[in-house]
Image (cartoon, rainbow, N blue to C red):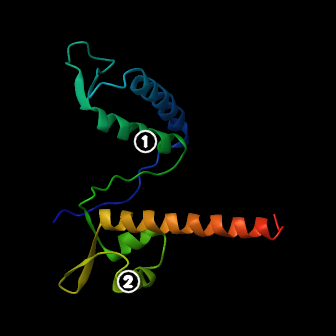
Amino acid sequence: MTKTDIRPVKLPPEKTATANRALTRVRGYLTEHPDLGQIAVKPLDDNELEPLTLPREAVELLAGLLAHLGAGRGVSIVPSTAELTTQQAADILNVSRPFLIGLLDAGEIECRLVGTHRRITASSLMEYKQADDRRRREAADELTQLGQEMGLM
């Protein structure tokens, strides 16, 4: 099994402007060419190299990365099939490891045992996170509505 490294990459402040300029160009290109399934990228400094052909999905992912990096946020790429340790999963959810283990034991997040160690696929973790975010938004919306009905807002 390959070790999954989830440490985020973060640009130094002097490089965020470069990321933002690149983001503007990438988004513009994607908008101007909505039907392209592949995009050719040519290095600026070498006229002899063939352009690098990338799938559109990879360029869209690159745009997302640039947006986060340009905003000064760290970014990690984790394959959806990657198996995470309980500590890595807890770090991603920003919860304690014992709290995460409680979620696993309650069946809230799928996991498998490798010997005595639990492993969580990144896709299972993201499914839980999205569902939890949705529940939180719904609860906040309900509280807002109740506050308005009671004249508190």
Q: Judge from the rendering whether residue 5 lies leftward or rightward of residue 64; answer left or right.
A: left
- In percent of the image, x 83 and y 68: which residue is there? 152
The residue that appears at 77% across and 65% down in the rendered structure is 148
- x and y percentages locating residue 39 in the rendered image: 28, 25
Q: Which mark is residue 64?
A: 1
Residue 46 is situated, as x and y percent measured from the top left of the image, at 26, 16
Question: What x and y, as percent, mark residue 32?
Answer: 42, 20
In the rendered structure, find residue 15 and report the number of the disc placed on it.
none
Q: Name the residue nearer the viewer: 106 or 49.
A: 106
Is 36 above or below relative to 3? above
Asked whether the viewer can see residue 61, the reply is yes
Instruction: Find residue 101 and name its label.
Output: 2
x and y, in percent, of residue 140 in the image: 63, 67
| Relative horizontal placement of residue 11, taking residue 57 as reference (left or right) | right
Residue pictured at 41% horizontal, 50% vertical: 9
Secondary structure at numbered mark 2? helix
Please, what is the three-letter code of the amino acid marked with disc 2?
A: Ile
Q: CA distance from mark 2 to mark 1?
A: 31 Å
Indicate which disc, 2 or 1, sits on the residue closer to the N terminus: 1
Q: Quadrant of the N terminus?
A: bottom left
- The residue at the point 25 percent across, 31 percent down is 54
Q: Is residue 77 above or below residue 108?
A: above
Dot 2: within a 10 Å radius of its alpha carbon, few (fewer than 14), some, or many (20 or more) residues?
Answer: some
User: Amino acid under label 1?
Assistant: Gly
Q: Secondary structure at mark 1?
A: helix
